Image: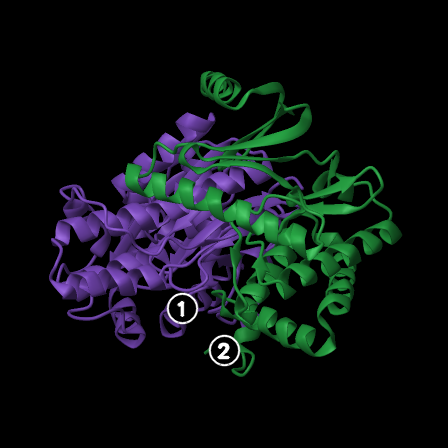
Amino acid sequence: MAIVLGIESTAHTFGVGIASHTGNILSNVNHTYVPKSGGIKPTEAAEHHSKVAPEILAEALKRAGLRMRDVDAVAVALGPGMGPCLRVGATLARYLALKYGKPLVPVNHSVAHLEIARLTTGLSDPVFVYVAGGNTIITTFNEGRYRVFGETLDIPLGNCLDTFAREVGLGFPGVPKVEELASRGKRYIALPYTVKGQDVSYSGILTQALQLYRSGKHSLEDICYSLVETAYSMLVEVAERALAHTGKSQLVLTGGVARSKILVEKLRRMIEDRGGVFSFVPAEYAGDNGAMIAYTGALAFVHGVTIPVEKSHIQPYWRMDEVEIPWRQK
Amino acid sequence: METKIAQLAGLIEDRLGFSIESVLGIGAEAVLLKGFLSGQEVVVKYRLKKNYRNEDLDRILRYERTVLEAKLLSKATLTGVSVPSVVLVYPEEGILVTSFIRGERLKEYMGTAQPENLKKIFQTIGREVGALHEANIVHGDLTTSNVILTQAGEPVIIDFGLGFFSNRDEDAGVDIHLFRRAIESTHPSLLDTAFNSFVKGYREARGKEKTTQILRKVKEIRMRGRYVRERKRSTSPDKPH
């Protein structure tokens, strides 16, 4: 059995997890940088990661009851993500690989969100709705890779809601706060509903929602309700299209926005009407975390995926559909 | 779902005098029924109410999409592009009745097709899509599921459910981008053959200059997607520290 230590540092979270390729999560320790004001400043987030890294690493090993010499390989999320943040995780991973003579395993952060969802939901071949602060993607496995069926043409859903929350003074993270207000909204105000084929667009709806807020003519509750209602319905529609197009019947929600109660409820209703199975990743593995990198790294490692330290460049623009998935049958 | 279709069948049989022969398909958005209306072989597209979304939003989307789809099909027919023809529109119920196209979906055909036949088919599709774009019709959901090959082997583009009118290169570009990606995601190995033939046909319909302009747009749209490597070509890959 392969035991792999995984490092996550693509955006605002620094995490270390330890997992086996059989799906045993031995530890998962994470710390998230929250900016005092505004959005994530990559250099400040990176500074945060450097500060917490030694402690997080020690804690992950301690909780797993292991020492570095007990792990078979070191996995790291080389992308996609923010350059300065990625560099912290990559540097630590290279150091550990060299110091302890461990193979280094490159992991695509997005693929890790999918694999941890497959593991924790037990659904083996789903259509994934992958929604986070930095990603909005509908994807499923086909011919050796995770193929992107639909995605945002501009800003991600998490980013749309977080930005709205910040601009109207609700703070970060925005999704739960917007949802709480939305649950008290009553009146639906039409907002730009933009579905292009299997892709969605969230920039127009964000602008329009902010204009509604600034006009002072509507309650914030109604605006939040309309925003969430429109933005989520677009995503559910595209997910349903992907199910219809691929003929698959399993649906999984993963990524940070998987904690959203309203989105979960909408997807559940869609699946109930259409017939099929729906599940979502548990909260602990919804946001960015080290365990998902460790587990995906372990799957890759037992299928011979490693990278020499000198070639382990970070890849801020690494798309999930560029990654071969040797651990799944074509 | 079965009870829903039964209710629907009752509704349109009573009100429209439609006799149902079979359920053609249950799509993401609508149920397709095949049958006869005044002796004509037709398809009834019924846009389903969606429980997951707000009722007002649901009503607006179903009404507007039904009306728009009928307009798009009519304009396409007038332009000379072969699409199903409109028989009846009933937007309050989200119902659109069109003529029935007998044949096989391109998606299924692609698995078994000879490369030469594929080239010819995609060239024709390119020409048809070019003609649609010339008429300011954007399909909005070009996939290999939305092209029917008639028994004569002629492709017919169906399902204008997400279409709209536009003369912007941007929208034509998104149409082509989506079609390209649909081929890429379901038949990756056939992408180059299929897409090159498509472009050849498109050029025939729109001319060299316009086609080059649109293809530049297609590339731009692809780059706009998140995490596209080509987008960052100007910066060299980061070196390990």
The residue labelled by disc 2 is B238
Amino acid type of the residue that numbered disc 2 sits on in the rendered structure: Asp
Seen at 19% across and 53% down, the residue is A223
- State the residue in front, B83 or A251: B83
**Which of the 4 image quarters holds residue B54?**
top left
Seen at 70% across and 42% down, the residue is B107
**Chain colored green:** B
Chain ID, mark 1: A
Q: For mark 1, does the 10 Å Cα neighbourhood hold few (<14), some (14 to 19), or many (20 or more) residues? A: many
Q: In the rendered structure, are the residues bearing label 2 and label 1 in contact, judged by CB atoms less than 8 Å apart?
A: yes
Chain ID, mark 2: B
**Chain colored purple:** A
- State the residue in front, A192 or A229: A192
Q: Where is residue B12 in the image (x, y as percent from the top left)?
A: 50, 22
Does residue A72 show up? no
Seen at 58% across and 72% down, the residue is B217
Q: Under tag 2, what secondary structure?
A: loop
